[in-house]
Every structure is written in C-alpha cells, then in structure tokens.
Image (tube, rainbow, N blue to C red):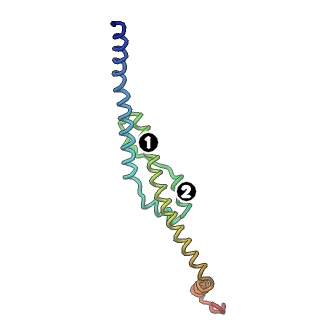
C-alpha cells in the first residue's frame, strides 16, 4: 500500500506544481488576444477604407489587402514576449479583417451603382449619348441628336 501511495503523491505534486504555469500562459495569451481585438476595432477607420473601396473600386480593395499594419509601440512596452507575439499577430489579423471588409463593401456598392448607371445609359441609347455630346461640344451638326 505504501509503495502505491508514493508514486501517486509524486504525480499529484508534479501536476499541481506545473498547472499554474500553464494557466498563466493561457491567461496571458487570452488577455493579449482580447486586448488586440479591442484595440484594432478602436483604431481602424472603417469609413476611410469604405471610401477607398467606393472611389477606387477593386483597386481600393487590393490596396486594403496589401497595406501594412503598424502596431502602436506604447501598448507593448513592459509586456512579456508571449504577450507581444500574441498581441501583434491578433492585432494584424483583426485590423486587416476589418479594413478588408470595409473596402469590399465600398467596392461592391460603387460597382453596383456604376453598373446600374451603365445599364441605364445603354438602354436609353442614342438619346443620352446625343444630349451628352451636345452639352460637351454644343454642336448641333449631328442631325438626329
């Protein structure tokens, strides 16, 4: 009986002495991810990226995808290396996600409106083209317009 109790006590002692280290790492990681998500949501200017998507269409969306993310250094001062690694990765991921989503919404919106305008212009045919030509050049020599 005594031979069985000693190994069990050693295993329990080892398990309980190591577990706080694992929980601390998990707590740091979870805090870093939560802080990064909160900061990224506060820092991103969704309106600006929406207008990039609207004004530049697919090019604005491509710029949003490829633009770099700058992490404010003052948020990482005095933090552990694990916190810095997790925070940086999550901040970059969340910032890019929010930025890309805003630019894509703007791109889809402007492309839809432009498509509608083009379809309407083509369905009106010569009438719109003639009026546009007349307004631009003031020339009435085109007869049918």
Q: Quadrant of residue 82?
A: top left
Dot label at residue 62: 2
- 54 or 3: nearer the viewer: 3
> In the shown orientation, is residue 137 left or right of residue 102?
right
Relative vertical location of residue 83 with respect to residue 62 in this rendering, above or below: above
**Which comes sooner in the sequence, label 2 or label 1?**
2
- Residue receiving disc 1: 88
Q: Position of residue 111 (x, y in %)?
A: 54, 67
Q: Is residue 74 visible?
A: no
Q: Is residue 47 above or below residue 138?
A: above
**Helix, strand or loop for disc 1:** helix
Of residue 121 and residue 60, the one placed in the foreground of this image is: 121
Q: Quadrant of the C terminus?
A: bottom right
Q: Quadrant of the N terminus?
A: top left
Residue at (44, 48) in percent of width and height:
94
Residue 96 percent location from the top left of the image: 47, 51
Q: Residues within 10 Å of mark 2 (few under 14, many from 20)?
A: some
Q: CA distance from mark 2 to mark 1?
A: 22 Å
Name the residue: 43% across, 39% down: 86
Going 35% across and 30% down the picture, which residue do you hit?
A: 23
Question: Percent x, y for residue 126?
Answer: 63, 85
Q: Residue furthest front?
A: 1
- Graded by Cα atoms within 10 Å as few (under 14), some (14 to 19) or many (20 or more), the crowding at tag 1 reads some
Task: Inspect this view and state whether residue 119 appears.
Answer: yes
Dot 2 falls on a residue whose secondary structure is helix
């Amino acid at each position: 009986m005594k031979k069985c109790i000693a190994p069990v006590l050693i295993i329990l002692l080892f398990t309980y002495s190591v577990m706080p280290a694992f929980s601390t790492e998990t707590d740091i990681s979870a805090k870093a991810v939560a802080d990064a998500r909160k900061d990224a949501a506060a820092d991103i200017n969704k309106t600006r990226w929406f207008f990039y998507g609207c004004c530049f269409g697919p090019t604005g969306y491509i710029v949003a995808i490829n633009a770099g993310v700058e992490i404010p250094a003052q948020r990482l001062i005095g933090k552990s290396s694990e916190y810095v690694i997790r925070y940086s990765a999550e901040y970059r991921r969340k910032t890019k996600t929010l930025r890309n989503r805003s630019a894509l919404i703007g791109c889809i919106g402007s492309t839809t409106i432009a498509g509608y305008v083009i379809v309407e212009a083509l369905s009106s045919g010569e009438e719109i083209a003639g009026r546009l030509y007349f307004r631009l050049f003031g020339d009435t020599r085109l007869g049918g317009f």
